[in-house]
């Protein structure tokens, strides 16, 4: 029996609820519950519903199954989702094409569709029901839970879960005082932000003098990032109405307003319907249930003003005026809407009221913490795996919410901050993850509960940008009444914007803090009083990021456009202007491109072959396709110059400045010497080995970097005025002390990381076991090596791949196998190198770790390995490999090459040298490269351990800069400049057709047959047309800065 | 112009010429015309006995009102916090590039209006773009192109 006519008595309502509850119980058909809140609809749930209904009609299944359309189920990530009862099956991300399978297999044959179940990414296991999913397991969904049970457009469905039972109880004889007492006992606090005790507010409103009183439901959910109120209004509007009715009875209000955001069309629709239904049945209006209680609710739609979430501004808005707050007291409970006593609570608060009345205040008070009772709904959004609405008991820690329920950060990224409380709230860092969530602890930490928005930020979020974002929001939303807020938010925004644009000054942070406190103190309403929170909390926890922006002109998260300019140039440790030389290639101006490259890099042909290209990793073309092949384009330019006989001639500088000693002729040493020579110094490089080049000459085999290419570039460096003395070892042939005595004014230690690490497994020292670096050195020096038929390489870095490919080229070798303990995704070697080695027939076995070397007559004969599996994530966010017990196996071999890792060998440094080390790594000041000894600088792998070529070149450049300052008696600091190209080149204009067709080129490679047992270079160069096409694909991010825009605008 | 007055008159009547209903009245007028025509505001002021400046004050205070005519298709890019950290600003600048207008403006042919909103409350599916009430979830720069093309096509057909 559906209720259709007016319900005129308490008994009648009791009957209706009983009938509807019985009807629900009597439902024998399986029920398919489809979520269809705004998010679900946006993800296509209507199509799912349509196709289910169509099929049911077509196949006449009406008596076998029921489809119920509900509001949001909270797990937004899994939309559209379907819950099937009985059976408790949760299907996620359901497409309309699945309707047939769901009906035929699950409903008719009771078969669970595996492919629609939730897959736990951490355990790899499928979850069948809601409660098997980690997202739901730890929640306590007392308010939100019913969303999944009812059709929000049908009041009868609300009756069927006992809805309006709390109103029934209230009107069945409770006094207003008793209701207020229950709410007081519950300890319920306002869920809108400030957390005022609801029962106390009601009591004040009840006691306020006046015949006419109002209540208001604040559904102006303006906090960006919070949407629990929308979800409740969409999914369970009668719950909120029931709460308002009970409140009105307790306070003695005759009229209620629902002030709801116009940006929530579906919520407006459902609430409007719900009010009409309630009114139609007599639950709103005159003489409700014959008890003499009169109450009605009217909708007032907000018109887009954040400040109207403030109660006095909201009241002004309902009165038809500009939404400016006014001074309190008098508080709205004394003088509110049209100067009558008015009680305002937010949606979630009202939604809690029926539960408290139904179950008791004491029941509610048992949930939560000492001062914060009950549950709170949070919207978990941003950089989080399980986005959605989460309802948890107060007191749960941020870590539990973010990692256990939210499933952590996507893409293996690092958690950086959580922002709570919207524009009035604050950002909390990693150190605060164990904070229990309640009103007090949050505000002590510098944030607020607010309405429950919880925005998760990862390493790619810039905290300066976040502060700028909120200030921009607040300066737009400030109503303008108080000068401190109107001007203060504007000025704070300007300061932070300047910082974000790279125009910040060091004194800005102090001014910002002062201003923030002034705005806080001098503003009248909550908006202004809390407007400084985003700034103050980010300054408190992320000050270093501000300093990076101001002093170093760096935005570590690469968000601030004016600092980043083009990501390729920004990410390049030596600031190569990739976007400029690429632009020249697109115009066919290869000589100009060559000059741009040479300006910043003394080893470009080397880099164009072996660079790990951080530029390509951040290339924006890679966000919606594949990144520009920047390394290949550089190679094209260098090869073009070589082919056309264009040689770089370093500028002639008269070398009349001091002598500088450089230890090691690797990329760091060569670069430092080169730039010092160009400044007029007289640098000498001392190299222990017989040839210059360091790891470039000794570590990388010819098939990847031909010796003559390296030699050519070293020749140019020599031409610039660099002396290289080989075969001289520091500590043996020369001493640091002696260098100073020989009138060298500074020393730069760039001795590299040339020692292989041992594995610490039995048998490691047997004959037939080689270490990668020593092996590669012999190969590169054309010394004899002992490679057998079956070679095993252990490791996953570039040295492992180089050693494996070199061994494969050895005449004696028949098969090469690589063992690596993690999977391909975790391999540190360049992806293109890994692929090339597989192409050449090298067998890579993943998830294997050696346990011991089995020897025969003192010679390595086999290796015992254990299989691994990926376990829990470690501190680095990568899943840690753990051995599988009893999975050991033996692999026969003739030669074993260990390529685990390398370390520096700085044993040449004596105690008297006063140069501090961490193990073998030299300790330097990161900023300047100075060691603990005055006049001695260090850089490259000797400091960092094994690192990329381009990082070593960068270290050399920094050393040249700081050594010059040191020698000429200046304060040794770094000069930081904004990342900008020297000149702006006009962009290529692509037709839509060309843009659609453009794709990353395949780099030519030496035919497999020609690679057999020789060290001929494998990788080729792009053709001119391929390079031209690829260069035109560049998005030219450098033109998006203000400088770039105006430069191009000027050219037009 | 007469038709505007007639429409506004019936709106006023529906709200019983109540001053306090001013915002609702303006919302209804905007729903009808997609913006607030000047003559409508003048007529509302006169009919309610409210100074025109107060009507304009309300019309300019609230973000939802527009004093400029809007295009046939309204593109709203959400710039809420969740959309912001997921790249909402990049989506907006792509629309700015594609449509060659600034946020708040309308293309010359009156086909598109581009606006931003501070949050639509669908944070889970951000970055969100809404065109004429249709929600586009997880928008990427690439999707911007197809969205613009989809609605631009309608322009050709008409």
Image (spheres, grey):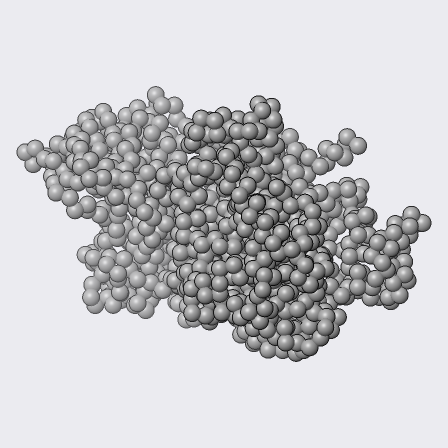
Task: Name the outermost residue toward the top.
Answer: A1009
Of A779 and A674, the residue lying toward us: A779
Tell whether A920 sits left or right of B143: left
Q: Is residue A5 above or below residue A172?
A: above
In the rendered image, which quarter contains the N terminus of chain A? top right
Residue at the extreme front: A11
Q: Is residue A257 visible?
A: no
Q: Residue furthest right?
A: B2
Depth check, front residue: A1037 or A891: A891
Q: Where residue A436 sits: x, y (%)?
A: 41, 64
Query: As displayed, is residue A45 above or below residue A925?
Result: above
Quarter-of-image position of residue A287: bottom right
Instruction: Pick out the residue farthest to the left.
Output: A857
Left or right: A680, with A520 as reference point:
left
- Residue A51 locus on image (x, y percent): 59, 30
**Is A166 situated left or right of A814 in this image?**
right
Q: Is residue A999 left or right of residue A310?
A: left
Q: Nearer the viewer, residue A71 or A282?
A: A282
State the residue at coordinates (87%, 51%).
B10
Q: Position of residue A774 (x, y in %)?
A: 22, 42
Q: Residue at x 20, y 38 (%)?
A: A866
Quadrant for residue A816, please give it.
Answer: top left
- In the rendered image, is residue A861 in sight? yes
Identify the residue shown where x is 55% and y is 48%. A18
């Amino acid at each position: 029996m559906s209720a259709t006519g007016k319900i005129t008595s308490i008994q009648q309502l009791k009957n209706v609820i009983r009938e509807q509850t019985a009807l629900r119980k009597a439902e024998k058909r399986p029920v398919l519950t489809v979520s269809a809140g705004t998010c679900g609809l946006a993800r296509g749930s209507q199509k799912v519903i349509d196709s289910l209904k169509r099929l049911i009609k077509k196949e006449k299944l009406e008596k076998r199954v029921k489809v119920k359309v509900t509001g949001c189920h909270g797990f937004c990530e899994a939309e559209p989702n379907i819950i099937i009862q009985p059976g408790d099956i949760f299907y996620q991300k359901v497409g309309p094409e699945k309707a047939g399978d769901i009906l035929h297999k699950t409903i008719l044959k009771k078969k669970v569709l595996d492919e629609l179940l939730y897959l736990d990414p951490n355990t790899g296991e499928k979850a069948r029901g809601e409660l098997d999913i980690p997202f739901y397991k730890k929640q306590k969904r007392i308010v939100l839970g019913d969303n999944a049970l009812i059709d929000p457009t049908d009041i009868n469905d609300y009756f069927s879960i006992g809805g309006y039972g709390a109103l029934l109880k209230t009107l069945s004889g409770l006094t207003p005082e008793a209701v207020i007492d229950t709410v007081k006992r519950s300890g319920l606090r306002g869920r809108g932000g400030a957390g005022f005790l609801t029962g106390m507010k009601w009591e004040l409103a009840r006691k306020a003098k006046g015949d006419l009183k109002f209540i208001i439901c604040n559904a102006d959910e303006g906090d960006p990032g919070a949407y629990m109120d929308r979800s409740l209004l969409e999914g369970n509007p009668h719950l909120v109405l029931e709460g308002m009715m009970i409140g009105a009875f307790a306070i003695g209000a005759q009229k209620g307003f629902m002030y709801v955001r116009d940006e929530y069309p579906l919520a407006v629709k459902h609430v409007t319907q719900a009010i009409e239904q309630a009114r139609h049945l007599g639950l709103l209006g005159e003489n409700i249930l014959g008890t003499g209680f009169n109450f009605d609710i009217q909708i007032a739609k907000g018109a887009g003003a954040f400040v109207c979430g403030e109660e006095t501004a909201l009241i002004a808005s309902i009165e038809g005026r500009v939404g400016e707050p006014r001074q309190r007291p008098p508080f709205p409970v004394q003088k509110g809407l049209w100067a009558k006593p008015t009680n305002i609570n937010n949606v979630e608060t009202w939604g809690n009221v029926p539960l408290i009345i139904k179950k008791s205040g004491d029941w509610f008070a048992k949930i939560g913490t000492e001062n914060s009772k009950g549950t709170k709904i949070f919207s978990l959004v941003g950089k989080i795996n399980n986005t959605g609405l989460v309802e948890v008991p107060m007191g749960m820690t941020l870590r539990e919410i973010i990692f256990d329920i939210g499933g952590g950060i996507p893409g293996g990224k690092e958690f950086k901050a959580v922002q709570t409380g919207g524009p009035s709230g604050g950002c909390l860092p990693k150190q605060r993850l164990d904070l229990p969530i309640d009103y007090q602890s949050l505000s002590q930490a510098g944030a607020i509960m607010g309405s429950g928005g919880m925005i998760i930020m990862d390493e790619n979020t810039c905290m300066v940008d976040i502060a700028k974002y909120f200030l921009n929001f607040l300066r737009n939303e400030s109503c303008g009444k108080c000068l401190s807020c109107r001007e203060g938010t504007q000025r704070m925004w300007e300061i932070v914007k300047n910082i974000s644009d790279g125009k910040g000054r060091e004194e800005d942070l102090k001014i910002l803090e002062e201003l923030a406190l002034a705005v806080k103190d001098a503003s009248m309403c909550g908006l202004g009083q809390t407007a400084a929170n985003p700034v103050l909390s980010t300054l408190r926890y992320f000050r270093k990021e501000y300093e990076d922006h101001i002093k170093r002109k760096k935005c570590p998260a690469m968000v601030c456009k004016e600092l980043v300019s083009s990501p390729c140039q920004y990410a390049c440790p030596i600031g190569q202007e990739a976007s400029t030389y690429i632009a020249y290639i697109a115009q066919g101006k290869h000589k100009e491109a060559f000059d741009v490259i040479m300006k910043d890099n003394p080893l470009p042909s080397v880099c164009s072959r072996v660079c790990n290209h951080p530029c390509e990793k951040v290339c924006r073309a890679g966000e919606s396709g594949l990144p520009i092949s920047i390394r290949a384009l550089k190679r094209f330019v260098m090869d073009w110059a070589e082919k056309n006989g264009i040689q770089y001639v370093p500028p002639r500088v008269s070398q009349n400045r001091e002598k500088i000693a450089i230890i090691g002729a690797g990329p760091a040493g060569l670069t430092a010497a080169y730039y010092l020579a160009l400044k007029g110094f007289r640098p000498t490089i001392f190299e222990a080995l017989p040839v210059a080049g360091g790891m470039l000459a000794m570590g990388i085999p010819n098939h990847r970097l031909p010796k003559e290419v390296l030699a050519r570039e070293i020749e140019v460096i020599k031409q610039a005025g660099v002396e290289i003395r080989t075969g001289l070892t520091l500590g043996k042939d020369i001493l640091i002390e002696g260098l100073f005595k020989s009138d060298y004014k500074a020393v730069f230690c760039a001795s590299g990381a040339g020692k292989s690490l041992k594995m610490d497994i039995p048998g490691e020292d047997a004959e037939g076991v080689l270490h990668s670096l020593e092996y590669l050195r012999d190969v590169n020096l054309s010394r004899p090596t002992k490679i057998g038929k079956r070679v095993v390489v252990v490791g996953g870095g570039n040295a492992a791949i180089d050693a494996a490919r070199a061994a494969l080229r050895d005449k004696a070798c028949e098969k090469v196998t690589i063992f690596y303990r993690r999977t391909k995704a975790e391999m540190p070697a360049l992806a293109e190198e890994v692929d090339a080695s597989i192409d050449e027939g090298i067998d890579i076995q993943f998830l294997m770790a050696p346990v011991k070397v089995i020897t025969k007559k003192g010679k390595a004969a086999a290796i015992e390995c254990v299989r691994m599996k990926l376990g829990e994530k470690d501190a680095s966010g990568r899943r840690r490999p753990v051995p599988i017990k009893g999975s050991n196996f033996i692999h026969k071999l003739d030669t074993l090459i260990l390529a685990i890792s390398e370390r520096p060998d700085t044993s040449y440094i004596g105690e008297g040298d006063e140069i501090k080390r961490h193990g073998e790594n030299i300790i330097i000041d990161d900023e300047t490269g100075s060691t603990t000894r005055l006049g001695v600088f260090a850089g490259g792998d000797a400091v960092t351990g094994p690192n990329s070529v381009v990082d070593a070149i960068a270290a050399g450049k920094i050393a040249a800069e700081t050594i010059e300052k040191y020698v000429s008696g200046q304060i040794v600091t770094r000069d930081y400049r904004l990342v900008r190209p020297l000149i702006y080149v006009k962009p290529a204009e692509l037709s839509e057709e060309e843009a659609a067709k453009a794709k990353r080129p395949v780099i030519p490679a030496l035919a497999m047959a020609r690679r057999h047992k020789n060290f001929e270079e494998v990788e080729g160069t792009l053709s001119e047309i391929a390079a031209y096409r690829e260069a035109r694909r560049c998005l030219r991010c450098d033109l998006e800065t203000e400088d770039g825009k105006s430069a191009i605008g000027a050219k037009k | 112009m007469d038709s505007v007055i007639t429409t506004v008159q019936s709106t006023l009547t529906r709200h019983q010429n109540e001053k306090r209903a001013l915002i609702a009245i303006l919302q209804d007028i905007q729903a009808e015309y997609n913006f607030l025509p000047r003559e409508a505001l003048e007529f509302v002021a006169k009919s309610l006995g409210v100074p025109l400046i107060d009507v304009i004050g309300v019309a300019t205070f609230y973000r939802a009102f527009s004093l400029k005519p809007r295009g046939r298709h309204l593109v709203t890019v959400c710039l809420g916090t969740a959309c912001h950290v997921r790249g909402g600003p990049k989506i907006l600048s792509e629309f700015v590039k594609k449509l060659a207008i600034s946020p708040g403006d309308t293309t010359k042919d009156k086909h598109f209006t581009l606006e931003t909103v501070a949050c639509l409350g669908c944070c889970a599916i951000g970055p969100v773009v809404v065109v004429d009430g249709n929600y586009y979830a997880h928008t990427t720069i690439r999707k911007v192109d197809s969205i613009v093309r989809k609605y631009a096509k309608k322009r050709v057909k008409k």
